[in-house]
Amino acid sequence: MGFKCGIVGLPNVGKSTLFNALTQTATAQALNYPFCTIDPNVGEVAVPDKRLFELGNVARSNNITPTRMTFVDIAGLVRGASKGEGLGNQFLGNIREMDAIAYVVRCFEDKSIPHVQGMIDPVEDCRTVETELMLADIDSLESRLSTLMKKAKSNDAYSKDLVTVINKALEILSKGQPARSTELSEKEIPLFLNLGLLTAKPVIYVCNVDETSLIGGNKFSDAVELYASKEEADVIVISAAIEAEISQLDKEDRLSFLSDLGVKQPGLDKLITAGYKLLGLLTYFTAGEKETRAWTIPRGSAAPRAARAIHTDFEKGFIRAEVISYIDFVNLGGEQGAKNAGKMRIEGKDYVVEDGDVILFRFNV
């Protein structure tokens, strides 16, 4: 399990350039006019994790397989998208399919690249995108409410509960706040998630800056950080132009290029780290002579749920999990060394998998 992240924003903010860089492809048309991305461009990228290669080397694996993550470059939004303006209907439909949203906002000045709203104001850009999504959510909820209220009056328990949740969400949305701000009981959370609201999705803010602002940011990215802090959302400062350059280099030249810029990690790594945090994901590993592989699961998953990432039969026929920590596996020379040192644990169905676990599942179908 990885996750599908939609790259969203106004036209000409650098979405397609960033997408091209992240996926190391040139499939998106990164041109300076609105709606150059007519259909969502989908790209899968390997999740970088140095632990995977260390484990593979220790296990002397023939193949090393990273877990993967999907980025979707979605057509630029304009005011009125919730009413079908521009490519509004398509834009909103594509967002509904995402697990998370990366709001890309323009935090650089360049007279050769026009801004669709005539001025550089990333906070206003954020508000424009969010407002259109909130208006679409309000329309969606109000259209469902009348039918549900009739059922609720006939003492349908499910409809009553759903009406309560919808009214809570509408109250928040009417205040100009995203639906994810709605306070819900444990019982109400599943009902809320099933509504498929656009502003219920978790958000990362991506500030696209120029090269000179890559290290410390600038006044535009500072304003976005202040805006995002109100909902405790993560902000990543990236230069899409620099990422595009990096994507064309081999590994050694890439590291040298980053070092010269004083940058510790590429934007892709930053975005994935923020995405994992946002969705509560972690990585565990399987390691052997044939293959060392990374698997992504929700944080808090018990061993059988983790086994499902490999195959549903592993979950159905789960017997036990043989677990070695990543550190012990590497430091003790692999599975046999960890066993000899008493560092391999036998865990049952209630074991909650930890990030970095190296696991061998025993099952019977």
Image (cartoon, rainbow, N blue to C red):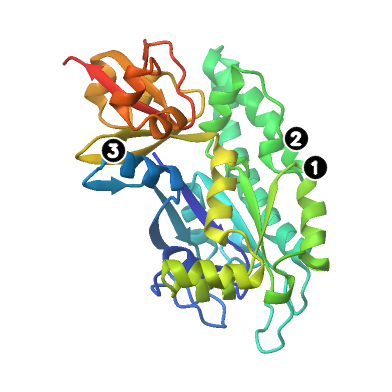
Q: Position of residue 257 (x, y in %)?
A: 55, 73
Q: Amino acid at mark 3?
A: Ala
Query: Nearest the camera: 256 or 194?
Result: 256
Q: Name the secondary structure under disc 3.
A: helix
Rendered image: mark on residue 171: 2
What residue does disc 3 label? 59
Q: Nearer the viewer, residue 149 or 229?
A: 229
User: Residue at position x 74%, y 58% from top?
Assistant: 127
Q: CA distance from mark 2 to mark 3?
A: 55 Å
Q: Quadrant of residue 293?
A: top left
The answer to whether 74 is drawn above or below residue 192 in the figure is below
Q: Which residue is mark 1?
A: 175
User: Residue at point 16% right, 16% down?
Assistant: 365
Q: Are marks 3 and 1 in contact (CB under 8 Å)?
A: no
Image location (x, y in percent) of residue 277: 59, 39
User: Residue 35, relative to residue 186: is it above or below?
Assistant: below
Q: Is residue 33 visible?
A: yes
List the single residue furthest toward the left: 365
Amino acid at circle 2: Glu
Residue 125, above or below 66: below
Q: Secondary structure at mark 2?
A: helix
